[in-house]
């Protein structure tokens, strides 16, 4: 006997995942996680091929969004329209993680909410404020909906995704220190961890940024070369474990954060070039909030990014900056609004452009 559960599958940015209404999943967390593992991998024991489930056998295609109408906030809190819980299925490990969020999948939340009747589309755009349950941040998302219909065609290009589509504007609010408690959770723009200079930062995604050159790398190495370098991966993991404690995350051995980022001088006109470990495999591009955190490190004085940034952008002090973050599949542009108050940077808004598309909907079946 199998259980049928309504679902949709959407591509959001350069990821794709399964989207559920919270009311359609078990309320018990353990039972809910069991259902998600069965949906994605077909087993609770872990299968890296995910052959008996709907997953795509990579971390970028093993993602889940659980969405509900937002509960009326308490006095003093920012109102939101939708609550979004992100769940990462850890490929082949028989477990899930909710310690982080995903900005790519977030781009699909409003389209999902419209398609499922949770909110009503308006002309010419539909805007909704999303409460990111994992981290507590708020994101204002604007979707193109001419005549109350979701627009899929457009000129917005997301590197790592074929073709173009209608732009989805994501303005992140209140993401600074959302997981670690502070933008610079160690209290410093640079720390030395295991003999390597690093910047620990959290503007929506906790990451540790290090210079590729400090590991004997150029910084343009591809995913296969980096993942085949076992001494490099072990060195980065040792740094990650120590950084976890410094960033108020505790023991991160079994967590997917912090992400680890190697930076190098840009090669295609961007601000900085990146290679992101998430945390044990190399990202084929870069995550949305990881890009936001890297871009933020580019405007914070004295971070490790300052020595490798392109010369024309190495002394950004304006209150609005558009920063192109290079990655293996192309580039990711982040728009930051910020100011310096008493020599301390204050981030007001972090904006990105994504695209999304509904791929399928119906019922999935779990044993």
Image (cartoon, rainbow, N blue to C red):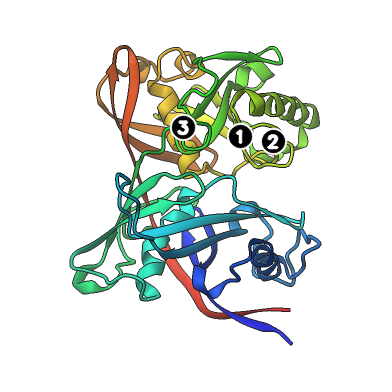
Q: Secondary structure at mark 3?
A: loop
Residue 157 picture location, percent across and down:
38, 51
Q: Which residue is mark 2?
A: 252
Taking the spot 45% from the left edge, 47% from the top edge, the residue there is 159
CA–CA distance between discs 1 and 3? Answer: 13 Å
Q: Which residue is mark 3?
A: 177
Q: Earlier in the sequence, mark 2 or mark 3?
A: 3
Q: Nearer the viewer, residue 122 or 283?
A: 122
Q: Earlier in the sequence, mark 1 or mark 3?
A: 3
Residue 209 in which image quadrant: top right
User: Could you tell whether 203 is left or right of 78 in the image?
Assistant: right
- Which residue is the extreme one toward the bottom? 1
Residue 278 picture location, percent across and down:
63, 40
Taking the spot 45% from the left edge, 12% from the top edge, the residue there is 302
Image height of 259 relative to 88, above or below: above
Observer-side mark, 1 or 3, equals: 3
Q: Residues within 10 Å of mark 1 (few under 14, many from 20)?
A: many
Q: Nearer the viewer, residue 82 or 41?
A: 82
- Which residue is the extreme one toward the front? 75
2 and 1 marks in contact (CB < 8 Å):
yes
Q: Which residue is mark 1?
A: 258
Image height of 282 relative to 239, above or below: below
Residue 25 in which image quadrant: bottom right
Q: Secondary structure at mark 1?
A: loop
Q: Secondary structure at mark 2?
A: loop
Residue 135 picture location, percent across and down:
49, 44
């Amino acid at each position: 006997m199998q259980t049928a559960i309504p679902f949709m599958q959407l591509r959001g940015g350069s990821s794709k995942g399964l989207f559920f209404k919270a009311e359609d999943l078990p309320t018990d967390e353990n039972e809910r996680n069991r259902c998600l593992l069965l949906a994605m991998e077909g087993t609770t024991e872990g299968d890296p091929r995910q052959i008996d489930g709907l997953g795509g056998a990579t971390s970028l295609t093993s993602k889940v969004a659980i969405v509900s109408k937002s509960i009326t906030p308490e006095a003093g809190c920012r109102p939101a329209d939708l609550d979004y819980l992100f769940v990462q299925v850890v490929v082949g490990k028989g477990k899930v993680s909710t310690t982080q969020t995903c900005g790519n999948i977030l781009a699909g939340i409003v389209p999902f909410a419209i398609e499922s009747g949770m909110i009503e589309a308006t002309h010419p755009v539909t805007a909704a404020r999303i409460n990111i349950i994992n981290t507590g941040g708020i994101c204002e998302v604007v979707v193109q909906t001419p005549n109350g219909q979701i627009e899929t065609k457009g000129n917005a290009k997301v590197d790592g995704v074929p073709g173009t589509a209608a732009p989805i504007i994501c303005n992140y609010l209140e993401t600074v220190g959302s997981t670690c408690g502070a933008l610079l959770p160690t209290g410093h723009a640079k720390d030395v961890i295991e003999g390597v200079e690093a910047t620990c930062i959290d503007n929506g995604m906790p990451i540790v940024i290090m210079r590729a050159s400090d590991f004997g790398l150029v910084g343009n190495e591809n995913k296969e070369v980096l993942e085949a370098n076992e001494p490099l991966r072990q060195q980065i993991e040792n740094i990650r474990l120590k950084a976890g404690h410094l960033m108020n995350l505790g023991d991160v051995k079994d967590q997917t954060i912090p992400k680890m980022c190697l930076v190098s001088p840009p090669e295609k006109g961007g601000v900085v070039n990146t290679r992101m470990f998430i945390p044990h495999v190399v990202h084929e591009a870069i995550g949305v909030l990881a890009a936001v955190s890297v871009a933020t490190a580019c405007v914070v004085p004295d971070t490790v990014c300052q020595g490798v940034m392109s010369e024309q952008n190495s002394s950004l002090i304006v209150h609005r900056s558009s920063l192109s973050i290079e990655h293996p599949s192309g580039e990711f542009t982040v728009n930051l609004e910020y100011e310096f108050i008493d020599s301390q940077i204050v981030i007001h808004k972090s904006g990105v452009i994504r695209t999304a598309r509904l791929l399928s909907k119906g019922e999935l079946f779990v044993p």
